[in-house]
Image (spheres, rainbow, N blue to C red):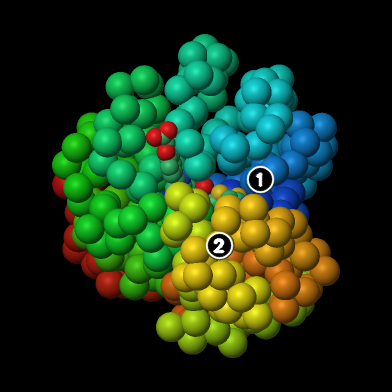
């Protein structure tokens, strides 16, 4: 499964783990990298010192490449951007904004830069300012999302840029991987599937929620605030969507979600927590190791694509 992305990143398989806040810490990231994919440490809203520590711990567990995801709304984004360079991280992905102001520093340090985009316009802008690849993330994804589905977004981004495109959103098994290649992607990024990995440190309640979720169980909160976030429905989303429909203020709405991801991931609070997950949660049925997940994805995708030229 060699593609422009496996070559660019020096990895075995074109499978990237999403940089999920609170979830994507060093145990998960190093396990995905050890399995031949690209593990990613998600900075989320964490302080720069935490990110540095995570990078150091990941280096102890793997000598293979791994990345860091910089969530651009992080108040310490500037410091984290520097930590990435200082610690010699090979790959950075970014989310929830445009990483333009860090691009020069990263490129000069030889860091491969892969912004996550939800539109053709941002993909083009990222290519112009030197991105090595982009992740085109559809609205099937968990967490902060755009407006367009993976099926519609990926081929449009592929046609709009010369750099390789990684597909994300709604991919949970080898069929999704094969489909992404058919759309012109050169790799996939997956989050929800890895939430339930054995090496994932999320609370057991969270994993069980993903495993139990059906196809129609996610909801998008925050459409009215300009920050749409996909989560598995629970008591919090019911209350949130009710308030949102009644025209509640941003302040009232934020009261419900503040610290919600931490409550769900760390405390296992399934009532007031934000259980971020993608629409593919309904497909995720059991906990497996990262190695088992990656090997299963590769085997299934390869058998579906027999005779298909990926880089054609
Ligand atoms: O970033 C994500 N997904 C995320 S970030 C996150 S942390 C969070 N926690 C609580 C509330 C809100 C966020 C959880 N999930 N995916 C990548 C992504 N980026 N999706 C969409 C975007 C995006 C959206 C707008 C990127 C750029 C953008 O505008 C850029 C510009 O300046 O025009």
Side of 125 relative to 268 (left or right): left
Secondary structure, mark 1, is: loop
Secondary structure, mark 2, is: loop
Side of 28 relative to 161 (left or right): right
Side of 307 relative to 302 (left or right): left
**Is 87 situated above or below 205?**
above
Residue wearing tag 1: 44
Circle number at residue 56? none
**Is 274 situated above or below 102?**
below
Which residue is depicted at the point 38% across and 52% down? Answer: 146
From the Cβ of disc 1, is ligand 1 less than 8 Å away?
yes
Q: Quadrant of the N terminus?
A: bottom left
Q: Nearer the viewer, mark 2 or mark 1?
A: 2
Q: CA distance from mark 2 to mark 1?
A: 26 Å
Residue wearing tag 2: 248
| Sooner in the amino-acid sequence: mark 2 or mark 1 | 1
Which residue is depicted at the point 31% across and 44% down? Answer: 119
Q: Position of residue 134 (x, y in %)?
A: 38, 39
Q: Quadrant of the rendered structure where residue 212 is? A: bottom right
Q: Is residue 6 visible?
A: no
Compare residues 72 and 204 and report the one nearer the observer.
72
Compare residues 282 and 229 and report the one nearer the observer.
229
């Amino acid at each position: 499964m060699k593609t422009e992305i496996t070559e660019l990143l020096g990895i075995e398989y074109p499978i990237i783990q999403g940089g999920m806040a609170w979830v994507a810490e060093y145990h998960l990231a190093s396990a995905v990298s050890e399995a031949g994919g690209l593990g990613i440490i998600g900075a989320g809203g964490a302080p720069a010192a935490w990110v540095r520590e995570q990078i150091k711990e990941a280096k102890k567990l793997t000598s293979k490449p791994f990345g860091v995801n910089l969530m651009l709304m992080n108040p310490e984004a500037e410091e984290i951007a520097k930590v990435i360079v200082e610690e010699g991280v090979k790959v950075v992905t970014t989310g929830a904004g445009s990483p333009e102001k860090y691009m020069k520093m990263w490129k000069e340090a030889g860091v491969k830069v892969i912004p996550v985009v939800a539109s053709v316009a941002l993909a083009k802008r990222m290519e112009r300012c030197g991105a090595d690849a982009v992740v085109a993330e559809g609205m099937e994804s968990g967490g902060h999302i755009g407006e367009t589905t993976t099926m519609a977004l990926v081929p449009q981004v592929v046609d709009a840029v010369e750099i390789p495109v990684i597909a994300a959103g709604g991919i949970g098994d080898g069929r999704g991987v094969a489909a992404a290649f058919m759309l012109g992607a050169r790799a996939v990024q997956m989050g929800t599937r890895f939430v339930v990995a054995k090496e994932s440190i999320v609370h057991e309640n969270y994993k069980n929620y993903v495993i139990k979720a059906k196809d129609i169980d996610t909801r998008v909160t925050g459409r009215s605030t300009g920050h749409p976030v996909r989560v598995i429905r629970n008591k919090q989303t019911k209350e949130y969507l009710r308030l949102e429909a009644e025209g509640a203020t941003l302040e009232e709405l934020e009261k419900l979600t503040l610290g919600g991801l931490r409550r769900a991931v760390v405390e296992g609070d399934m009532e007031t927590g934000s259980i971020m997950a993608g629409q593919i949660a309904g497909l995720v049925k059991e906990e497996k190791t990262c190695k088992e997940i990656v090997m299963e994805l590769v085997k299934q995708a390869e058998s579906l694509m027999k005779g298909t030229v990926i880089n054609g």
